[in-house]
Amino acid sequence: MASLRQIYEQHSAKLLLYARQWCVHPEDALQDAFLDLIRKQPPPDDPVAWLFKAVRFRAMNVQRKESRQVRYRAASSETFDEPWFQPHLDSQLESAEVVEALKRLTDAEREIVVASVWCELTFEQIAALVGSSASSVHRRYQAALRQLSSALNSPVSTKRIAP
Amino acid sequence: MNDQNPRSRSRSDDQPELEQAGKLNDLSPDELDVEQKLKTLKPVGPSLDWDEFAASLMDHCTIENLPERESDARGLLMPQAIEVSLLKTSQAVSAPARSQLVASWVGGMALGACLMLAASVLWNRHAVQSADGTQLSKNRQATLPDRRSTIEIEQSAIDAVANANAVPVAAGGDSAAGDSAGEPGFEPSEQQIVGERFVGDRFVDDTWQTNLLYPWSYEATRNGTPRLTVGYLVTVRHPRSHEAAHFSVPATPRIRAESNLPSRSPRGSYQLLQELLKTGVF
């Protein structure tokens, strides 16, 4: 079984992105999930898959906390919007536009796209997370990709690439 | 990572079910194109490296060191529900230091009913040994009307923390965790001095019930002069038995990140505290 360190170093970015769908402080959710994993007895057979489920749950909890803080956030005009993706000059897409396009998806579609594209989960794993069937997840995935294709392939959305 | 692309596996693995559902597992050219483009983006990684992250986990785990006789209190002290800190102004040690304790809610489930524990706000004008030997001491505790438990900072711990010479180094945290508040010989252990936070010098009293993470950063931003505090001994008294449980305040990764200080283990935090006391930050 992979060590906690290996899991953290290999999957923390994916887990953070996955949690970021729900909350603006995903690292708190990640920490809570790892604490849960440490305390889990007996340890899960697939700690990575288990962590995704724990992060999902924790991120939703963090989201509820954050929703209670909106008034304070507004009072200080402080924003916690953090980038979802690393700046990448070679990427054919602007990360900000991708995030905006993702946010226009339904919650379920966005979760499936994030889990599939960046978290590299199988459709079966995603199905277990969202409580659906793999075929349903795949259908939603296709629908979400079509929406993203439409949103991102417009002339104003496609990043210009130097010849 | 891409060598073992589970996406590739997923399609073959899901194929029977998908075919059974009358769906092909293929993506159209447009779908494949956008999928490939999306994959060129890489998620932002964590702000903490493994060592820092592991230290933050260890901070939380110190809560587990509470003794069995505090089991009632421990059952209510879920780490994620506790956000308590002693706020200290950044006055020099030679001046009277005013501390402000803000306690947050502690949630618990008992017999199917959700027991929400409120907290209290304790203003402490604690004893500080000044350079010329003058000692000022004053305790003031303000409690909120709907509080069901009292969370307070032990005066002895405050004094110990405020005075570098009075902070003993005790190995481990179990013994201190089991001591009752104010008992002779009570000494904070290094495991109970953890975490770093920037905080304001004043707390918004109507915000403590929801979550203390945000008001801390809010105060720091609004005042423009972030304050530094270090995790402290906190004593939680059980609402019925009045048993005391001592624990340290863990710092979340975000707090650590906002502190602009390296994440530290409990021992490192203790050393940091010592350094700060020497420089007169407190």
Image (cartoon, rainbow, N blue to C red):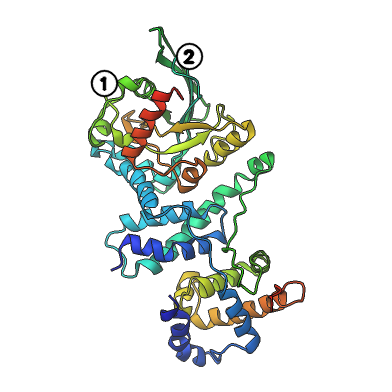
Please state the horizontal and vertical placement of residue B219, each as a whole percent of the image.
59, 34
Q: Amino acid at mark 2?
A: Ala
Q: Which quadrant of the figure has residue B249? A: top left
Image quarter (top left, top right, bottom left or bottom right) of the N terminus of chain B: bottom left
Q: Which quadrant of the figure has residue A144? A: bottom right
Q: Residue at x 46, y 74 (%)?
A: A121
Q: Amino acid at mark 1?
A: Glu
- N-terminal of the pair, mark 2 or mark 1, is 2
Question: In this orientation, does residue B239 appear?
Answer: no
Please state the horizontal and vertical placement of residue B218, each as a whole percent of the image.
60, 37
Please give the label number shown on residue B183: 1
Q: Residue at x 57, y 48 (%)?
A: A66
Query: How many numbered tags mark residues here?
Result: 2
User: In the figure, is residue B209 to the left or right of B110?
Assistant: right
Q: Is B174 rendered above or below residue A65?
A: above
Give the CA separation, mark 2 to mark 1: 28 Å
Q: Residue furthest front?
A: A163
Query: What kind of element bears circle 1?
Result: loop
Question: In this orientation, does residue B13 appear?
Answer: yes
Between B243 and B161, the residue placed more toward the observer is B161
Using the rendered image, report if marks 2 and 1 lie on a common chain. yes
Determine which residue is flagged by label 2.
Answer: B95
